[in-house]
Image: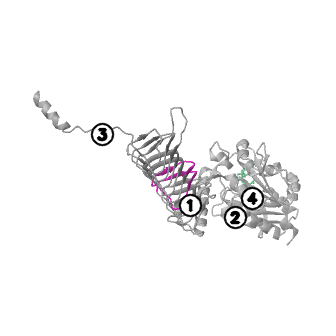
């Protein structure tokens, strides 16, 4: 192996452009692709590919872009005026870089670490000074065209500056380059802006280096790495491709899908083998799902941890919640942040929970609101139970219910309140005082019965 292999790798990501065609107030590179800002994808791929340093060129909306990229440990370099891609690279101060540089557009979110690694490996194996990554497209549209002489790379010509003949070329510039840092320092200052846009084009580096007999090569890649985002239609297309990629990976790892085209799982999510995803599920963020779990249609799961053999039934909405093994929730359950459901518990339809610990084998089958509550094990929470956790003083109070408590239907717990183990709450009660263990508590209007009440009425009429 040559010393080159361990040479330092730096990525320069161009992200200063306005993204006019997005027609959106958000800087282009912050638009989310499958849940994450597209620049984040580019930075992640760079780091995973072994980049020791990532320099992001910012300009338009730089305050916002910095908020997203700086916490990822990358350095921002400002390009005040967008004078072209070569000018943008100069703003990264290449004279302060050593080793190999990969230049990429910040709006190519489908790029993966393995792609970058491949390009760098080829560049080093072929002992190149400069390499440009190309792809052959059915419709090369606005991409720069790769012009070859007798098969050898000669130049890149921008679509706007190309003749009708050149526009017929289907091999295009993906906008990804691998280059020695020393070449950038030497040749960037030589690039001129005599073209239709009066911009300094990084693409001119190719012809300049070829003229000087540097070793310049085209690395032929796939159309995937050419997928850039310039408008909302392309953004949606990139998002669909990323969801598809994730679904394929999950299936390779043994996740079952009835229709992978309608499964939307973000890249950060982990799912165990044997789990089944029904059509139209959306799983986001830091969610983790175990094995042999079933997620039915229209479930929305965000930042939640779900164990093995769990049933998440149709239409359920889960945020920042934790479901232990063998739990079942829904259909139509809403679990709000900080809810934890322990083993074998059941949460049924139209049940909402927030900041709740719901014990092992407990059940809340129907139409219930539990908030700021701790429910023990094997508790039965009857239909229509409500924890009245929010008081007139605008503060939240806790409800604590022991193990094996039976809560009759239509009960209200006026918090703060505690119910001891094995207590029974009579149906229709409004519980305002603590209930000790083993007690029966009933708090409702007494029923009175007036016999023959309706039979009397006709008699009264007869008198008139
Ligand atoms: C560029 C290439 C083209 C290639 C295409 C691939 C040039 C001249 N052309 O064209 O050959 O086929 O990418 O997508 O390089 N940017 C800055 N500062 C600037 C100008 C641009 O940071 O002054 C950034 C943009 O934010 C964007 C990237 O550079 O992320 C590419 O710029 P863009 O104007 O989209 O170039 P293309 O016309 O797509
Ligand atoms: Mg572009």
Q: Foreground mark, 3 or 2? A: 3
Query: Label 2, label 1: how many angstroms apart (C-alpha)?
Result: 43 Å
Residue corresponding to mark 3: 447
Structural distance between the alpha carbons of marks 3 and 2: 81 Å
The colour scheme applied to this rendered structure is: one colour
Task: State the residue position of label 1.
Answer: 307
Sequence-earlier tag: 2 or 1: 2
**What separation in Å lies between label 3 and label 1 (alpha carbons)?**
46 Å
Callout 4 touching callout 1 (CB < 8 Å): no
In primary-sequence order, the first of circles 3 and 1 is 1
Q: Helix, strand, or loop for circle 4?
A: helix
Question: Residue at image x 47%, y 43%?
Answer: 387
Tell me: residue 69, above or below residue 415: below
Considering the numbered disc 3 on the image, is that residue within a helix, a strand or a loop? loop
Q: Which of marks 4 and 2 is in front?
A: 4
Q: What stretch is highlighted in magenta?
A: 314-339
Decide which of 223, 262 is in the foreground and name it: 262
**Residue highlighted by disc 4:** 46
């Amino acid at each position: 192996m040559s010393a080159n292999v361990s040479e330092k790798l730096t990525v320069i990501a161009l992200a200063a452009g306005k993204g006019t065609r997005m027609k959106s107030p958000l800087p282009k590179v912050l638009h989310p692709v499958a849940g994450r800002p597209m620049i984040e994808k580019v930075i992640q791929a760079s780091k995973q590919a072994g980049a020791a340093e990532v320099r992001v060129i910012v300009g338009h909306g730089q305050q916002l872009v910095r908020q997203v990229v700086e916490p990822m440990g990358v350095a921002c370099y400002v390009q005040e005026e967008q004078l072209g891609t070569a000018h943008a690279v100069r703003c990264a101060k290449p004279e302060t870089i050593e080793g190999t540089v990969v230049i990429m557009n910040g709006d190519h979110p489908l790029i993966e670490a393995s792609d970058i690694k491949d390009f760098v490996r080829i560049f080093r194996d072929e002992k190149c000074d400069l390499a440009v990554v190309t792809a052959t497209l059915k419709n090369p549209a606005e991409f720069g065209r790769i012009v070859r002489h007798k098969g050898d790379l000669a130049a890149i010509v921008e679509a706007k500056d190309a003749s009708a003949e050149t526009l017929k070329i289907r091999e295009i510039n993906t906008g990804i380059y691998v280059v020695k840092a020393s070449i950038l320092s030497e040749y960037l200052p030589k690039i001129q802006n005599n073209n239709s846009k009066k911009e300094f084009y990084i693409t001119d580096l190719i012809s300049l280096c070829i003229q000087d007999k540097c070793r310049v090569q085209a690395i032929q890649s796939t159309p995937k790495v050419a997928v850039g985002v310039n408008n909302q239609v392309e953004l949606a297309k990139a998002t669909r491709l990323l969801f598809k990629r994730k679904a394929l990976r999950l299936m390779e790892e043994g996740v079952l899908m009835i229709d992978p085209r309608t499964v939307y799982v973000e890249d950060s999510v982990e799912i165990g083998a044997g789990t089944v995803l029904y059509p139209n599920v959306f799983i986001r963020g830091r969610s983790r799902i175990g094995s042999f779990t079933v997620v039915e249609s229209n479930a929305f799961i965000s930042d939640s941890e779900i164990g093995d053999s769990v049933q998440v039934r149709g239409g359920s909405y889960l945020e920042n919640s934790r479901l232990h093994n063998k739990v079942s929730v829904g259909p139509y359950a809403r679990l709000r942040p900080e809810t934890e459901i322990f083993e074998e518990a059941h949460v049924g339809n139209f049940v909402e929970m927030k900041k709740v610990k719901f014990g092992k084998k407990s059940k809340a089958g129907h139409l219930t609101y539990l908030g700021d509550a701790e429910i023990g094990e094997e508790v039965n929470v009857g239909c229509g139970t409500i924890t009245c956790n929010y008081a007139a003083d605008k503060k939240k109070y806790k409800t604590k219910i022991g193990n094996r408590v039976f809560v009759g239907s239509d009960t209200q717990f006026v918090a703060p309140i505690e119910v001891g183990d094995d207590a029974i709450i009579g149906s229709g009660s409004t519980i305002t005082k603590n209930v000790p263990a083993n007690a029966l508590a009933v708090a409702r209007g007494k029923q009175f019965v007036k016999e023959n009440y309706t039979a009397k009425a006709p008699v009264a009429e007869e008198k008139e």
